[in-house]
C-alpha cells in the first residue's frame, strides 16, 4: 500500500533548514492548501451536477420506455402515425427529443433495445431512429476527433443498419486508433456479412480474441460464404487470421475444406492447431478419427485432451485398443478422457435394437 | 571534511533524495493512473458484455474460493458465486480443514454427495479428504473439496489441481462480487494482441456498513466505524491511484489475493502458490512474471478498476495490526525470494522499476520513517529543534499529503462515484486530515513489528474473526401491471 | 392468464408486458430474480416468462426452484443461446426457450400455446 508520511520529511529538517528559508515552505503550503480547497469546491459542485444529471436521466428513461415499447408494438403505419400524433400533442417531441441530452439517451436506448428485438418491432425502432433525425447525431459523432465518440457512432450506425453510410465506416477501418479500427471492421461485417471480411486479406496485426468473438456473432449460418476466400485465409502468415478462419469453417460447416483443416493440425502456432482440432468436431469425415489418432503422439497436453474430446464424439469402435493403451497414461486427465471415449464407443457399439420380428440388430447411436 | 561530517551529509542527503524520489513517484503514479483509468472507462462505454456472455467462444473459468471457518456466511457466499453472470464456469470451494460447521452446512443445502473426480495432481498439496458434487442439476457448477488444513496457498493449489478450465479466478469466499464481475475480469485476457495475458487483477472495495441483500450489495455507504472508514480512503488511493499506473507501464507486481484471475497453465508451470510465505498472492505474480521473462515470452499482467469485489475490512486495531504485520512479512519474503531481479535489466520493467520501488518505498520506507521519528524525538528532547522552521516544513508535507488524498477522492468521484453524498465526501476529507496522526503511525508501527517478527521467524496467519455484513432488507416496489 | 414476467431491462419488460396485456393477459412485472420468486409464491401465476441473467437469481435457478413444487409452464427468454444452456434449461424443466433478438409477436403466439 502506498502511504505518505510526515515523518520521513521531518528527518530532512536539518538539511532543508540550511537550504531554504521557512518562508518558502509556508508559501508552498499555502499554495497546496488553496489547491485542496479548489478541488473540494469542484467536488461539491460536481456531486450536485451528477445527482441532477442522474435523476434527470432516470426520468427520461422512464418516459422513453413507455414511448418506445408502444412504438415497437405498432403493427401498421397508421398505428405509428397515431402514436406520433399523441407524442406531438404531449409536446414530448418538441421538448425531450429536441434537447441534446434527451436525444443522446434516446439513441442509446433505441440501440440497446434494437439488439434484442427482431421483426416488425425492430423495423419500427429503425424508423424512429431515422424519422427523428437521430442519424444526424450519430454522423456528427462519427466526424468527431474523440476516438470514443467515433467508435460509439460506428456501433450505432451499424446496429441501425445504416448501410448508406458504409463508405464512411469503411474509411474508419484504416484508422490509426486501434479501437476505431476494430469497431469499424466489426461494423462492416455487421452491415455486409461475409463480404465484409475482406480486411482479412491485408491485416497485419493480430486479431484479438474479443474481436473474433464479436465478428463471429455478426455472422450467421445463413450468410453466403466463399470457400476460396477461406482457403486463402488458411494460408495467411497472420496466425490469428488462420485461427479465425478455422472458427468460421466450424461455424459454416464447410465440409469441402476438410483436407485444408487437417493440414492445420501441424501448424506452427498453438492456437491454430487447437482451433483445427476443435473444427474437426463439426466437419469430421471417415478418416478424421484416424488422422487425429496419428496426430496424438506428437501433440501437446492441451491438444491431446482436445483430440480425446473430439474422439469421444467421433471415435470409432476400431480405435478401442488406442484408448485402452491410454488407460495407463501417467496424466490422470488423459486417462479419464480416454476412459470416457472408450465408454462412449462401447455404448454405441453394443446397443441392441429389438426389431418387431424378434431379430436382434446392432444400431449406431450417434 | 572528517568522517563524521561525511556520514552526516550522506545520511541527510540520502534521506532527502529518498523523500524527493517518493514525491516524484507519487506524482507520476497519480498522472499515469488518471490516464489509464480514463481510457478504460471510455472504452467501457461501448463494450457490449452480452456478446461475451452469449458467445460459444468465451473462455472457461474456474472460480476458486478457499474457506476456513466460514460457517456463518458460507451458504450465502456460495449462492452468490453460483449466480454469476457467465456461461462456462465452475465454482470450487476448498474447505481447508475448517474446525466449524462450514462443510456440514453446505452438504444439505446444496445436496452434496461424495463423488470421484479425476484430476491430475500437478502441484503437491496436503491430503484431500473428499470431493463433493451436487445431486441437484441446478447446482451442477459447484464442486466442494474437503482437505486437511494447510493454509490458503495450499488450498488454492488444490483448487488449481482440480480445476479443469482455462482461467482460474482466486477469490476470498466472503467477498461479495458484482454479478458481471467475471465478464469484466475476463475481458483483458481476450483483448490482447500478440501478448499473452497471464493474470488480471481487480479492485477490492470496502463493504463495511454497506447494505447487503442475498449476496449482493444493494446500497453503498461509507463505513460507520473509524478504522474501516480510513481504510476506504487508503484503498481508493492505493487502487485507483496506484495499481492502474503500474498496469499502464506493465510493471504490476501485486494482485490482490481477494480477487484475481490467472492463466491456469502458466500458474501450474510456474509452480503454483508457495505455502512457505504469507504473501503468497504477490509471490505468485512475481514468479509467474519471472517465468515469462526468463523464457522471453511476450506477456502482460492486466488490471481493471471497476468496483467488482467488496470485502470486509478490519475494524479493530488488533486485527488491523495483524493484517499489516502479515502484509509486511509477505512483502519481505517475496522480495527475498526474488532478489535476483533487483535492478536486473534482463527482467525489464519489473527488474528496473517495480522491484526497486517495492524494495525502497514499500519495504524500506516504514523503517526510514520509524528511524526518522525516533531521531526527531531525540532532537526535540535535546532542544535542537527550531520550532518555527519545523512548523513550516511540517505544514508543507502535511499539505501535500492532504492534497494527494483529496486528489484520490476526486478521482473516485469522477470515475465510479460510489460515495455520492456530500457528507460522505467530507467524512473522507476528515479522514485525510487525521490520517497522518492516527492511522499512519499505527501502520508504520505494524510494519516495523512485521520486520521484527520475521526476523524472529513467526509463521502464521493469525486468526481473522468474522463480523458479518450489515443485513438490511432492500426496499423495492414491484410494479403490478393491470 | 396471469403471467409473471421477469426481465431486468426496463424497456424490454415494458414491451413484453404491454404486448401480453394487449392479448388480454394479466401481467406481473418484476425486474429481479428474488422478487420473481416472491411473486410466484404470492400470486401463483399461470405462466412464467423469465430472462436468465438477472440480479439476485439466475433464471435457471428460478426454473429449478419452481419445478420443486409446481408445474407452472416456464418460458425462458434470453440472449444466451449457447447449446449447453438451452439443454440445461430444458433439463431443469423449462417448457420453451426463446433467444434474443426475438419478435414480440412470436412471443405472443408461443404464449397462446399455454392458454387453457
Image (cartoon, rainbow, N blue to C red):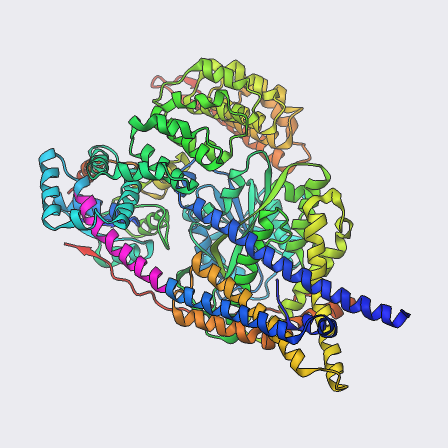
Horizontal and vertical percent for residue B276?
A: 72, 57
Q: Nearer the viewer, residue A151 or B46?
A: A151
Q: How many badges with numbers are in the image?
A: 0
Residue B57 at least partly seen: no
**Residue B13 falls left or right of residue A225:** right
**Residue B382 falls left or right of residue B88:** right
Indicate the quadrant where residue A330 lies. top right
Q: Nearer the viewer, residue B333 or A48?
A: A48
Residue C44 sits above or below residue A198 on the image: below
Q: Nearer the viewer, residue B469 or A325?
A: B469
Indicate the quadrant where residue A272 lies. top right
Q: Tell me, yes or no, whether the highlighted magenta stretch contains residue C10.
A: no
Quick one: quadrant of the C terminus of chain C?
Answer: top left
Horizontal and vertical percent for residue A230?
A: 47, 17
Residue B148 sits above or below residue A220 on the image: below
Horizontal and vertical percent for residue A66?
A: 19, 49
Residue A5 sits above or below residue A355 on the image: below
Q: Nearer the viewer, residue B179 or A296?
A: B179
Residue A323 sits above or below residue A117 on the image: above
**Residue A103 falls left or right of residue B430:** left
Task: Find the magenta span and give its range.
Answer: A47-70
What residue do we see at 55% from left, 34% from top? B193
What residue do we see at 43% from left, 20% from top? A253
In this view, which residue lies farthest toward the right?
B2
Amino acid at each position: 500500500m502506498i502511504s505518505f508520511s510526515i515523518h520521513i520529511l521531518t528527518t530532512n529538517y536539518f538539511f532543508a533548514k540550511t537550504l531554504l528559508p521557512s518562508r518558502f515552505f509556508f508559501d508552498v503550503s499555502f499554495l497546496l492548501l488553496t489547491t485542496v480547497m479548489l478541488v473540494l469546491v469542484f467536488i461539491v459542485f460536481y456531486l450536485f451536477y451528477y445527482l441532477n444529471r442522474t435523476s434527470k436521466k432516470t426520468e427520461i428513461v422512464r418516459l422513453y420506455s413507455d414511448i418506445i415499447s408502444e412504438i415497437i408494438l405498432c403493427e401498421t403505419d397508421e398505428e405509428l402515425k397515431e402514436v406520433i400524433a399523441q407524442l406531438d400533442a404531449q409536446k414530448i417531441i418538441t421538448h425531450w427529443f429536441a434537447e441534446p441530452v434527451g436525444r443522446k439517451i434516446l439513441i442509446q436506448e433505441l440501440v440497446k433495445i434494437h439488439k434484442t428485438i427482431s421483426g416488425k418491432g425492430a423495423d419500427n425502432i429503425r424508423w424512429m431512429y431515422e424519422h427523428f433525425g437521430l442519424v444526424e447525431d450519430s454522423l456528427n459523432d462519427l466526424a468527431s476527433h474523440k476516438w470514443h465518440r467515433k467508435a460509439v457512432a460506428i456501433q450505432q450506425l451499424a446496429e441501425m443498419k445504416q448501410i448508406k453510410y458504409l463508405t464512411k465506416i469503411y474509411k474508419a477501418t484504416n484508422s490509426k486508433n486501434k479501437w476505431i479500427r476494430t469497431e469499424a471492421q466489426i461494423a462492416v461485417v455487421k452491415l455486409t456479412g461475409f463480404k465484409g471480411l475482406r480486411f482479412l486479406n491485408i491485416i497485419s496485426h493480430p486479431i484479438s480474441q474479443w474481436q473474433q468473438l464479436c465478428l463471429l456473432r455478426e455472422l450467421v449460418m445463413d450468410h453466403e460464404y466463399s470457400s476460396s476466400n477461406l482457403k486463402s485465409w488458411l494460408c495467411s502468415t497472420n496466425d490469428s487470421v488462420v485461427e479465425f478462419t478455422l472458427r468460421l469453417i466450424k461455424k459454416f460447416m464447410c465440409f469441402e475444406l476438410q483436407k485444408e483443416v487437417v493440414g492445420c493440425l501441424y501448424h506452427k502456432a498453438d492456437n491454430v492447431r487447437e482451433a483445427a482440432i476443435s473444427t474437426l468436431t463439426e466437419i469430421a469425415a471417415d478418416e478424421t478419427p484416424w488422422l487425429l489418432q496419428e496426430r496424438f503422439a506428437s501433440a501437446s497436453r492441451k491438444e491431446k485432451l482436445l483430440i480425446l474430446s473430439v474422439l469421444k464424439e467421433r471415435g470409432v469402435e476400431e480405435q478401442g485398443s488406442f484408448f485402452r493403451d491410454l488407460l495407463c497414461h501417467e496424466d490422470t486427465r488423459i486417462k479419464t478422457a480416454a476412459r470416457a471415449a472408450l465408454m462412449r464407443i462401447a455404448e454405441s457399439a453394443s446397443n441392441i435394437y429389438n426389431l418387431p420380428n424378434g431379430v436382434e440388430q446392432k444400431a449406431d447411436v450417434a | 571534511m572528517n568522517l563524521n561530517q561525511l556520514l552526516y551529509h550522506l545520511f541527510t542527503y540520502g534521506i532527502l533524495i529518498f523523500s524527493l524520489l517518493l514525491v516524484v513517484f507519487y506524482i507520476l503514479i497519480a498522472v499515469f493512473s488518471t490516464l489509464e483509468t480514463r481510457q478504460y472507462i471510455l472504452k467501457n462505454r461501448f463494450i457490449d458484455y452480452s456478446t461475451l456472455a452469449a458467445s460459444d467462444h468465451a473462455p472457461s473459468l474456474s472460480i476458486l474460493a478457499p474457506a476456513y471457518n466460514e460457517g456463518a456466511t458460507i451458504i450465502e457466499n456460495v449462492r452468490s458465486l453460483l449466480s454469476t453472470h457467465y456461461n462456462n464456469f465452475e465454482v470450487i470451494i476448498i474447505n481447508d480443514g475448517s474446525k466449524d460447521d462450514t462443510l456440514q452446512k453446505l452438504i444439505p443445502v446444496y445436496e452434496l454427495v461424495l463423488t470421484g473426480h479425476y484430476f491430475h495432481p500437478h502441484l503437491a498439496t496436503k491430503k484431500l479428504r473428499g470431493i463433493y458434487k451436487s445431486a441437484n442439476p441446478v447446482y451442477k457448477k459447484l464442486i466442494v473439496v474437503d482437505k486437511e488444513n494447510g493454509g490458503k496457498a495450499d488450498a488454492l493449489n488444490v483448487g488449481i489441481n482440480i480445476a479443469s478450465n482455462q482461467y482460474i479466478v482466486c477469490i476470498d469466499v466472503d467477498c461479495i462480487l458484482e454479478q458481471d464481475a467475471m465478464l469484466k475480469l475476463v475481458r483483458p485476457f481476450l483483448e490482447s494482441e500478440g501478448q499473452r495475458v497471464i493474470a488480471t487483477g481487480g479492485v477490492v472495495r470496502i463493504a463495511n456498513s454497506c447494505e447487503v441483500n442475498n449476496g449482493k450489495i444493494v446500497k453503498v455507504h461509507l463505513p460507520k466505524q473509524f478504522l474501516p472508514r480510513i481504510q476506504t480512503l487508503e484503498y481508493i488511493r492505493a487502487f485507483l491511484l496506484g495499481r492502474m499506473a503500474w498496469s499502464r507501464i506493465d510493471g504490476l507486481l501485486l494482485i490482490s489475493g481477494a480477487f484475481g484471475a490467472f492463466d491456469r497453465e502458466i500458474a501450474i508451470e510456474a509452480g503454483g502458490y508457495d505455502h512457505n510465505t504469507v504473501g503468497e498472492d504477490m509471490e505468485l505474480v512475481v514468479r509467474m512474471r519471472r517465468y515469462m521473462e526468463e523464457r522471453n515470452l511476450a506477456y502482460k499482467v492486466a488490471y481493471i478498476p471497476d468496483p467488482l469485489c467488496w470485502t470486509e475490512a478490519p475494524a479493530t486495531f488488533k486485527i488491523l495490526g495483524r493484517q499489516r504485520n502479515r502484509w509486511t512479512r509477505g512483502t519481505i519474503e517475496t522480495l527475498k525470494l526474488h532478489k535476483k531481479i533487483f535492478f536486473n535489466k534482463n527482467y525489464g520493467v519489473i527488474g528496473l522499476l517495480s522491484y526497486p520501488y517495492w524494495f525502497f518505498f514499500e519495504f524500506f520506507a516504514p523503517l526510514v520513517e520509524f528511524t526518522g521519528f525516533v531521531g526527531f524525538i531525540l532532537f526535540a528532547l535535546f532542544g535542537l529543534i527550531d520550532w518555527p522552521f519545523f512548523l513550516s516544513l511540517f505544514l508543507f508535507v502535511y499539505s501535500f499529503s492532504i492534497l494527494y488524498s483529496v486528489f484520490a477522492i476526486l478521482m473516485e468521484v469522477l470515475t465510479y462515484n460510489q460515495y455520492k453524498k456530500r457528507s460522505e465526501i467530507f467524512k473522507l476529507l476528515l479522514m485525510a486530515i487525521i490520517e497522518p496522526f492516527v492511522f499512519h503511525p499505527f501502520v508504520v508501527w505494524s510494519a516495523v513489528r512485521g520486520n521484527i517478527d520475521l526476523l524472529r521467524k513467526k509463521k502464521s496467519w493469525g486468526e481473522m474473526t468474522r463480523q458479518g455484513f450489515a443485513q438490511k432488507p432492500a426496499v423495492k416496489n414491484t410494479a403490478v401491471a393491470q | 392468464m396471469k403471467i409473471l414476467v421477469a426481465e431486468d431491462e426496463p424497456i424490454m419488460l415494458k414491451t413484453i408486458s404491454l404486448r401480453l396485456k394487449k392479448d388480454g393477459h394479466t401481467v406481473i412485472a418484476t425486474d429481479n430474480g428474488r422478487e420473481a420468486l416472491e411473486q410466484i409464491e404470492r400470486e401463483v401465476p399461470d405462466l412464467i416468462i423469465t430472462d436468465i441473467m438477472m440480479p439476485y437469481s439466475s433464471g435457471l435457478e428460478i426454473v429449478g426452484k419452481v419445478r420443486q413444487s409446481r408445474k407452472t409452464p416456464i418460458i425462458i427468454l434470453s440472449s444466451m443461446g449457447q447449446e449447453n444452456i438451452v439443454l440445461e434449461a430444458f433439463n431443469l424443466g423449462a417448457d420453451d426457450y426463446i433467444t434474443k433478438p426475438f419478435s414480440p409477436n412470436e412471443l405472443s403466439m408461443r404464449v397462446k400455446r399455454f392458454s387453457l
